[in-house]
Amino acid sequence: MSVLPWYALLLPLFASAIIVLLTQRARNASAYISVAAVLISFICSCIIFSRPNISAAQLTWIDVPNFLRVPIAFTLDPLSKTMLLIVTGVGTLIHVYSLGYMRDDAGKSRYFAALSFFIFSMLGIVLANNFIMMFIFWELVGVSSYLLIGHWFERDAAADAAKKAFITNRIGDFGFMLGILMVWSATGSVIFNDIAPHIARITANPTFLTICVLLIFCGAVGKSAQFPLHVWLPDAMEGPTPVSALIHAATMVAAGVYMLVRVSFLVQASPEALRVIAWIGTITAVMAALIATQQDDIKRILAYSTLSQLGYMIMAVGLASDEAAMFHLFTHAFFKALLFLGAGSVIIALHHEQNIWKMGGQGKNMFLTFVTFACGTLAIIGCPPFAGFFSKDAILALAWERDRLIFVLALFTALLTAWYMVRLLVVVFLGKGRTQTARASQESSNIILLPLVILALLALIGGLNFFARHFLVLPHENRAGALVPVLALGAMIAGAAAAIVLYRGRNEDPISIAVLRNKFYFDEIYAALISLTQGSLARLAAFIDRWLIDFVVVRGSSKATWGVGTLVRLVQVGNLQAYAFIFGLGIIWIIYFAIFR
Amino acid sequence: MLLLIVFLPIIASAALLLGAPARATALGASAITLVLSVLAFFDYDHAQAGFAYVRSFPISTDLRLNFAVGADGLSLTMILLSSVVLLAAVWFTGKVDRYENAFYACLLLIAAGAIGAFASLDLLFFYAFHELALIPTFLLIGIWGSGNRRAAAWKVTIYLALGSFVLLIGLIMLYRALPAATRTFDLRAIQAAASAGQIAPAMQSPIYLWLLAGFGTLISLVPFHTWAPEAYASAPAPAAMLHAGVLKKFGLYGLLRIALPMLPDAVRQWSNLLLVLLLANIIYIGLATTAQRRLDWMLGYSSVMHMGYIFLGIVSVNVLGATGAALLMFAHGISIALLFGITGELRKRVPTLELDALGGLARTMPIASFAFGLGAFAAIGLPGFANFAAEIMVFFGAFRNGFDFQHFHFFQWATLLALWGVVISAVYLLRAYRRIFWGTSAEPAAVPDISFGLRLPVTLLVASSLFFGFFPQTLIERVAPTFRTHLSK
C-alpha cells in the first residue's frame, strides 16, 4: 500500500481549493502554489512509475449491497502509469509556460485554480478502476475545460464556445452513461476487473455487445471531438493558448482514446463496433485535415490538426491495435503541445494577433521559437527521425494490413497534414513581416522558451525505440516492409513541396474553397437542426403549458366548478389576512371531518 | 431532542409575533435547529435501523390517536435538509420593507410545518403539519411577493389545498382499509399491518391513486404542476427557497414513507402510468423550461422538471432507486435553494430578470456569479455535488427493472429519456448562466456584488451538497434500511 497515488491525485485539488478559498487576491502566490502542486504530482508519478508492484488504499463511494458498488480505487498498470507521466509531465511544462503567458492577466488566480483542477480531474480519469469513477472525472475535466475556455468570459465568443463545448460533451456522455448502464445490467458490476471475467454474458449476445460498445464509444466521440461531435474543439480555441495546448491537444481530448484502450476487453470483442470506430476515426482525420488547409487563424489550424490526429488514434483503436493508438497518443502529446505553445509564443509577441496573414518573418525575430516550432512541424508531418514518423507509420502499416481503403484515406490525410503544416510554417515564419507589429516582434521570455525547448527535444526522440519502449508496448514490426514508410514519406514530401511552392512569398491565400473555409457548414446545419427540432418543440411545450393547460383547462374548469372568479373578486377587496384565517378554519374543518367521521 | 427540533421554530415564530427582535431571533432559532438536526442525523444508530428519538403523547385512546414523533434515516435526512435551507433562507432575507417580524415568522412556520411532518409518526399530524406550512406560504407570496402576487398566491393555495384534500381522502381510505378493530393513524402500526398483508390487494390500487394525485399535486407532477412556476416567480426569494427546497419534498416524502412500503404492489401495478407522467415532467417540462425567457420562471419550471427524476427513483420500487430518490430530494432542495437565493439578490439589483436584457454581471459580481455557477452545476448533476450521486443511483435503480438482453422495456426507455433530460438541463442552465453572467455587459452602471455576509449561507448550502456528493454512503447507510425490509432486493 502506498499513499503516493493519492498524493499525486489530490495535491492539484488542494492547490485549487487553496487558491479559491485563500489566495484569490495574491495572484502570484496562486500561480506558484499551482505550479508547485503539479510539479510534486509529477515527482510522485515518476516514483510510481519506477515501482512495479505499487498499490493504494481505496474508498467506498456508493455501496448498496446486491445492487451497486462504486469504489474510488486506482488502476496502476503500465498503461495508467505512462498516462500519469504524460499528464503531469506535460502539465508541469505548461504550468511553467503559463507563468509567462498569463503573467499580467487579471484573472490569474482563477486561471491557475482551474488549471490545477483540470490536472486533478485528468489524473482521476487515468487512475479510475471502474466506469463510474471514470465518468465522475470525465465530467470534471469537462467542467474545467468549460471554465478555461470561458476564462475571458467577457468575450462573447469565449462564453459561447465554453457553453458549446460542455453541452456537446454532454451529448456524448448521454450515450456513454447508457452504455455503462447496459454493461452493469448485464454483468452486475461497474469495476473493470470484475466485468472482464463476466464478459461472456455480454459477448453471448453480439447485437447487445455492439450496442454497448458503440454507446460507450459515444463518450469518446464527445471528449475526443470525433465526427459528428467535433464542432466544439475549434471553438474551444477561444481559451488561453496554454489551455489549448494542455487540454485541447495533449491530454483531455486524448482521454477518449485512453478510455477505449482501458476497456479494450469490451471494445475489441465486437468486430462490428470496431468497424464503425475505425471509420469514424478515418472520416474525422480526412475531414479535419481538409478543413485545416483553408483556415487562417493559427490556433484553429492547429485545432483541426488535433482533430485529424485524434482521428488517427481512433482509427488505430478501430483497427484493433491499442498499441498503435497509445503510441500516437504519446508522441502527439509532445509535438502538439509544442506546436500550440510555439503558436502562443508568436501570439503574445504579436499582441494577440492570430491571423497568419498578419504575421510573417517571425523566424528572424523569434529564432528559438521558430526552431522549436519547426521541430513540432517535422514531427507532426511524419519526417524521420521525429516522433510522429514512427507512430504514424505504425498506424498506416496497420491500415495497410486491415483495410486498404482506410489506408488510402490515411495516406491522403498524411499528405494534407504536410500541406497545411508547411503552409503554416512558411506563412508565419518565413518571408517578410506583413504588418508593422509582425516586423517589430521580439523573442519571448525564457520562461516561455524553456518548455518549448524541452518539448522539442521530446518531439525529436519521443518516437525512437530506445526511448519509447520504456513507456509503452510498441506496435509490432509492420509486415508490409518498406512499402508503407516509403509511401508515407512520398506523401509527406509531395504535400510539403506543394505548400512551399504555392505559399512562399505570398501575402494572401491563392486558394479559396468556400466549403472548406466554412468547415463543411457543420455549425450552420446543426444550428438549423436544433432550432428546427429542440427549439420548436420547446416553444410548443412552453406554449401548451402556459396557455392551453393552464389557461383553458385549469382556469376554465376551475371557474366552472369552484367559482374561482368569486374568490378573485374577494381578493381584490383586499385584506389578505382575513382570507388566511378563513383558510385555516377550512383546514380545521377537514381535520375534524377526518377524525370524527 | 427531536421534539425540540420540531417546536423550536414554532416557539421562535410565536416569539417573533410577540415582538422579539426579528432577524436575531430567526437566525438564532434556525441556527440552533440546524445544530440539533446535524447532531440527530449523525447520532442516529443506523445499525439499529427503525425509528429513534421516539416520543409519544396520547391524545385519544378511543381513536388510538397519539401525538408521536420519531425519526429514522429518511426523516432525519429531510429534517437536516429543512434546517439547512431554513438557516440559508433566513440569512438570505435582507431588508423587509413591511411587517418584518411577520415575514420571519412565516419563514420559520414553513420550516416548522415541514419538519413536523417529517418527524410525525402519526398520519394525522403528518397531514396537519403540512397544512400548517401552507398558510405562511400563502401569506408570503400574497403580501411580500412580486409581479402578479395576489393571483399567484390564490392559485398556489387553491391548488395545494385541493391536493391536500385529495391526499386526505387517500389517507382516510388507507385508515379504513385496516381491519376495524385495529384502525389507527400510527405509521408504525399501519406499516406492520401492511407487511402482514392486512391491506387487501384490491384496496391498494385506489388508495395509491388517491395518494398519487394528492401528493402529485403538491410535488407538481404533470398535469398538476401549473401552480409551481408562477408561484416561484412571484414568491419572495426566501419563500421560494423554502417551498421549492423543502416543503415540496413533503409529497415525495409521503410517497416514500407511505406508498412505497405499504402499497408496493400498487406502485408496481401503476408504474407505467407514473412513468408516463414523470417523463412528461422531465421531457415536456424540460423543453418548456428551455423556452423560458425570464430567469425566475425558468428556475420555477426547472424545479418542476427535476421532480421527475425523484419520481423515477420512487417508481423503481427497489432499495437503490428509493435511496437515490431520498438523496436527490436532499440534493435538489439544496441546489434550488441556492439558485433562488442568488436570483433574489439579482432581483434587488437589476431592473429585469429577462435573460436577453442581462449580461456580463460576473465582472462586477464575482461572488454571486460563482455561487450561481455552483448552484447551476449542482442542478445539472456535476459529480462532486450530491445531485450526481443521487442521479446515478436513480438511473441505475430504474434501468435494471425488467432488464433483458433482447429488448428495451418501458423502464429502460424511461431511463434513456431521463438521461436525455440531463442534457436538456445543461442546455437551459448553462444558457442562462452565460446570458446573465458572461459576455458583454448590458448594464451601464456597475452592479454591486452580494454582501460579504451572504457568503456564509452560500457556503453552508454548497458545503452540504458537496459533503453528500463526496460521501453519499453516510446517507445511504442511514436511509437504505428504511426500504430494505419492505422492498425487493
Image (tube, coloured by chain):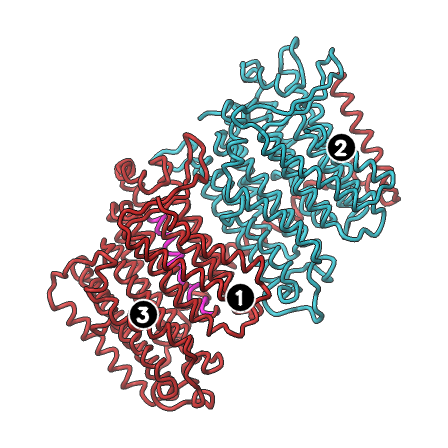
Chain colours: A red, B cyan
Q: Position of residue A119 (x, y in %)?
A: 43, 58
Query: Mark 3 to mark 1: distance in Å?
Result: 30 Å
Label of residue A304 in the image: none
Residue A566 falls in which quadrant of the image?
top right
Q: Main secondary structure of the magenta part?
A: helix
Q: Amino acid at mark 3?
A: Phe
Residue at 25% from the left image edge and 58% from the top image edge? A471
Q: Chain of mark 1?
A: A
Query: Mark 2 to mark 3: distance in Å?
Result: 67 Å
Residue B4 in the figure: left or right of residue A308:
right
Q: Amino acid at mark 1?
A: Ala
Q: Label 1: few (<14), some or many (≥20) within 10 Å?
A: some
Q: Earlier in the sequence, mark 3 or mark 1?
A: 1
Residue marked by disc 2: B132
Label of residue A335 in the image: 3
Mark in front: 2 vs 1 = 1
Q: Position of residue B250 (x, y in %)?
A: 65, 34
User: Considering only vertical position in the picture, is A42 above or below B241?
Assistant: below
Q: Position of residue B2 (x, y in %)?
A: 68, 29
Q: Is disc 3 in the same subunit as disc 1?
A: yes
How many marks the image carries: the answer is 3
Q: Is residue A545 visible?
A: no
Residue marked by disc 1: A29
- Point out the stretch of residues depicted in magenta: A214-238
Residue A432 falls in which quadrant of the image?
bottom left
Q: Chain of mark 2?
A: B
Q: Label 2: few (<14), some or many (≥20) within 10 Å?
A: many
* Residues marked 2 and 3 touching at CB (< 8 Å): no
Residue at 36% from the left image edge and 50% from the top image edge? A127
Mark in front: 3 vs 1 = 1
Q: Amino acid at mark 2?
A: Leu
